[in-house]
Image: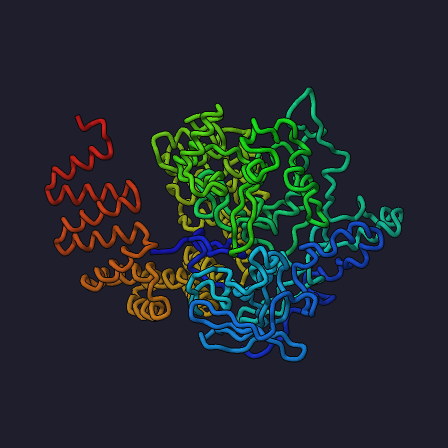
């Protein structure tokens, strides 16, 4: 039972509980030095290129003034009576049986709370983190680790429920073994937060010592965080002629954020929506904001100013559980993934059309920012909003950008700017925007009002989000929706990329046809999607299509291609392809070491080593993963599978027993132990362990099938069939589940059950 590379992918998030793809791993006492400013002469060369905002302010005083006091300015601060907003006057907060105390000792801010061993201890606060609507505090742990405490200060006004301590994970019972405990790697500043809350970060990490010596150029999000290192620009400003004579180009900027320069939005021919005066921009501005305003993982150690996003980051797909079926935000995904879905993005709208890039404030209050481009007279009218003008229900933002609250107090708005389609809301169990104000009503009530107003939506999917939702249902018209979305060249690329990831549901023939077409697509995100979806393709198809992508100019595409080809036997590919694969896999390993402090990274490296038959290196990498994070389940499961492949099941059993003492409720550990017992013919033990795995709330289908087959093996075929039939309520009519169930019915001679199942699957055959 090998956990794949994709399953261990790190996609960072700051707030709510991680999704299934990273929830198994946590991130990651004595006083140690906290991060220091990046030193000149740093091996990255970065320190010599940054000049600091004082140099920028000499010519850009107005922008600097707007920036002061912004959330970027206050993203992280040194401790002071002014910067610390929370009550440290011996305040006490109780949560799930744990007590946290906040107090002062001379010029120190201190917190007494549950530490790495579950026992109370005192910890010095080193920095404030964030400012509004909440402020967290960074606390020291050994090894140069700064951790974000999960008990935060609600900095909203008291009449809005603020001015109190609260737990960012609400009422969840989180102890020191939980992935989300403040001492775990998921709350580590260096990995999860630092590159977006500071400028010119240099993350120095020693994996052997498990120690950080991280530094920065500026503690907060300053000028060069967005515009890039300013040394060349300052040289140009001081002597433009000399700069050009020495070979400098342009104004010496790493990235020119000038997409709005000379551009306006104008209403033509009585149109209700303005059009951009020039064709859509280069995308530089959105790409500049994306690294910190997206759910993504990092694949480059160096900053990527002005470069392609996929050369430095891997964005999360528009898939559950991060998003709803139609692409609305669900988990904490920030803005990039939803904005790329929007028609506004398609028309060339950029971030700074709505937000001032220095103060971060809206360019106009509330819905007035929308009226910059949308005819106020029409769209503010009751005929459009179905609400009284000026009321909450008449707000553009409430209907078209419904918020989701994260970290208990922090509402974030969906930036896909979609038109509510209430018929699909009911059909697909999507969030009902009307229910935010009309909590006592259901979606049917709102739909009736829309129908009365002549505003009911069509029953057929017609928009990109609806097509995406239908394509993910596995229903009769899913294939049609999937193909329509993939082939629609006007649709957002991020949705087409997500649709490509669902191609296996259409079968091998469709996978080959569409893969062949889009493996040479102009948009790198489509090529990246093809390289990834072919990981689940037959080997012959992988060998036919993927090798060309090993030379792709975009890093994410190359890496995905190498991962797809990693398990392919050398006898099936040419020597030239083998060499390219080895080269890109080395690049992939270097990419994983960008986050060398993460157990996920070493698990991914171990998987590559195992494909290369470097078994000792693979075992060392798995052991490193478990040393860094003894709660990371995929490393246990994969190492046990390596022991199986090398006839060391006895060691695997010991390891799993050790893991279960730490994580007794982890279904995948019970599943792995059950399979080990099956191999040893210890069927009673196997049935117990597989039963634990199959009946867990987060059970996987593979565990359910394994449990049913063990029941069958001891002669309880009818019981196994009943169990699988009941499992349909959890897993639907999965092909493998149905095939296994039919096989059990056939072996027991239960013809009536076979006919009943067939009638359920194909109702029209009942007559």
Name the foreground residue: 156 vs 254: 156
- The image quadrant that residue 662 belongs to is bottom left
Relative to 265, does residue 750 appear above or below in the rendering? below
Q: Is residue 562 left or right of residue 75?
A: left
Quadrant (top left/top right/bottom left/bottom right) for the N terminus: bottom left
Residue that lies at the very extreme toward the left in this rendered image:
749
Q: Quadrant of residue 689?
A: bottom left
| Residue 511 makes an appearance in the image | no
* Figure check: 147 above or below 742: below
Foreground residue among 36 and 416: 416
Residue 603 image-quadrant placement? bottom left
Residue at the farthest top position: 269
Taking depth in this image into account, of 35 and 592 the one nearest to the observer is 35
Left or right, 210 with respect to 631, comes to: right
Q: Is residue 335 above or below residue 163?
A: above
Q: Residue at x 88, y 52 (%)?
A: 238
Percent across and percent down for residue 593 are 54, 60
Residue 376 in sight: yes
Compared to residue 339, the image places residue 113 above or below, namely below
Q: Residue 694, how many percent across, how many down?
A: 27, 55
Question: What residue is at 49 percent from the left and 43 percent from the top?
Answer: 436
In this picture, residue 314 sits left or right of residue 747: right
Find residue 314 and report its horizontal and vertical position in percent. 54, 48
Tag count in the figure? 0
The residue closer to the viewer here, 574 or 341, is 341
Which image quadrant: the C terminus? Answer: top left
Residue at x-position 56% and y-position 59%: 192
Residue 569: x %, y % from top left: 40, 49
Residue at 15 percent across and 43 percent down: it is 745
């Amino acid at each position: 039972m090998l956990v794949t590379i994709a399953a261990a992918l790190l996609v960072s998030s700051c707030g709510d509980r991680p999704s299934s793809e990273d929830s198994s791993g946590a991130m990651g006492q004595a006083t140690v030095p906290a991060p220091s400013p990046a030193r000149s002469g740093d091996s990255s060369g970065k320190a010599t290129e940054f000049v600091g905002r004082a140099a920028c302010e000499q010519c850009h005083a107005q922008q600097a003034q707007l920036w002061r006091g912004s959330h970027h300015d206050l993203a992280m601060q040194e401790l002071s009576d002014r910067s610390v907003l929370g009550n440290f006057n011996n305040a006490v907060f109780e949560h799930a049986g744990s007590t946290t105390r906040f107090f002062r000792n001379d010029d120190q801010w201190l917190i007494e709370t549950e530490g790495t061993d579950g026992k109370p201890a005192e910890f010095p606060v080193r920095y404030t983190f964030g400012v509004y609507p909440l402020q967290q505090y960074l606390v020291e742990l050994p090894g140069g680790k700064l951790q974000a405490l999960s008990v935060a200060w609600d900095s909203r006004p008291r009449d809005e429920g603020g001015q109190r301590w609260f737990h960012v994970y609400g009422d969840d019972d989180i102890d020191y073994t939980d992935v989300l405990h403040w001492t775990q790697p998921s709350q580590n500043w260096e990995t999860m937060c630092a590159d977006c809350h500071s400028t010119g970060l240099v993350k120095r990490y020693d994996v052997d010592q498990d120690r950080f010596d991280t530094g920065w150029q500026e503690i907060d999000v300053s000028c060069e965080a967005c515009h890039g290192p300013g040394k060349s620009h300052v040289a140009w400003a001081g002597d433009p002629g000399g700069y050009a004579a020495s070979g400098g180009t342009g104004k010496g900027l790493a990235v020119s954020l000038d997409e709005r320069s000379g551009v306006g939005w104008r209403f033509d021919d009585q149109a209700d929506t303005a059009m951009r005066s020039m064709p859509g921009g280069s995308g530089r501005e959105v790409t500049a904001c994306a690294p910190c305003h997206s759910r993504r993982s990092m694949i480059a150690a160096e900053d990527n100013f002005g470069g392609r996003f996929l050369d430095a980051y891997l964005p999360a797909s528009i898939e559950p559980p991060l998003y709803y079926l139609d692409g609305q935000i669900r988990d904490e995904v920030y803005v990039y993934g939803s904005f790329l879905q929007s028609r506004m993005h398609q028309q060339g709208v950029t971030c700074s059309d709505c937000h001032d890039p220095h103060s971060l404030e809206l360019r106009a209050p509330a819905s007035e920012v929308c009226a910059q481009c949308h005819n106020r007279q029409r769209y503010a009218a009751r005929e459009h909003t179905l609400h009284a003008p000026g009321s909450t229900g008449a707000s553009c933002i409430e209907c078209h950008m419904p918020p989701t609250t994260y970290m208990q107090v922090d509402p974030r708005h969906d930036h896909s700017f979609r038109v509510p389609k209430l018929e699909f809301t009911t059909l697909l169990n999507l969030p009902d925007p009307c229910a935010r104000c009309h909590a006592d009503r259901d979606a049917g009530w709102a739909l009736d009002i829309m129908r009365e107003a002549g505003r009911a939506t069509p029953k057929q999917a017609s928009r990109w989000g609806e097509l995406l939702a239908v394509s993910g249902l596995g229903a009769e018209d899913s294939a049609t929706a999937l193909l329509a979305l993939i082939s629609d060249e006007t649709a957002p690329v991020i949705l087409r990329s997500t649709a490509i990831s669902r191609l296996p549901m259409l079968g091998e023939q469709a996978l080959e046809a569409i893969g062949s077409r889009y493996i040479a697509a102009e948009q790198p995100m489509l090529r990246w999607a093809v390289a990834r979806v072919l990981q689940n393709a037959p080997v012959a198809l992988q060998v036919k299509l993927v090798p060309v992508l090993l030379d792709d100019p975009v890093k994410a595409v190359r890496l995905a291609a190498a991962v797809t080809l990693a398990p392919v036997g050398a006898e099936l590919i040419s020597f030239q392809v083998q060499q390219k694969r080895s080269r890109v896999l080395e690049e992939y390993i270097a990419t994983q070491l960008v986050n060398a402090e993460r157990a996920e990274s070493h698990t991914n490296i171990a998987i590559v080593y195992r494909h290369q038959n470097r078994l000792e290196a693979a075992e060392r990498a798995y052991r490193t993963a478990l040393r860094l994070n003894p709660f990371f389940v995929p490393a246990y499961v994969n190492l046990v599978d390596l022991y199986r492949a090398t006839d060391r099941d006895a060691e695997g059993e010991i390891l799993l027993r050790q893991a279960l003492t730490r994580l007794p409720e982890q279904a995948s550990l019970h599943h792995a132990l059950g399979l080990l017992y099956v191999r040893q013919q210890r069927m009673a033990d196997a049935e117990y362990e597989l039963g634990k795995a199959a009946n867990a709330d987060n059970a996987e289908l593979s565990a359910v099938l394994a449990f049913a087959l063990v029941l069958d093996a001891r002669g309880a075929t009818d019981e196994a069939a009943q169990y699988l039939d009941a499992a349909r309520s959890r897993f639907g009519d999965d092909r493998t589940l149905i095939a296994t169930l039919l096989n059990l019915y056939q072996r027991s001679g239960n013809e009536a059950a076979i006919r009943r199942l067939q009638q359920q699957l194909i109702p029209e055959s009942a007559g």
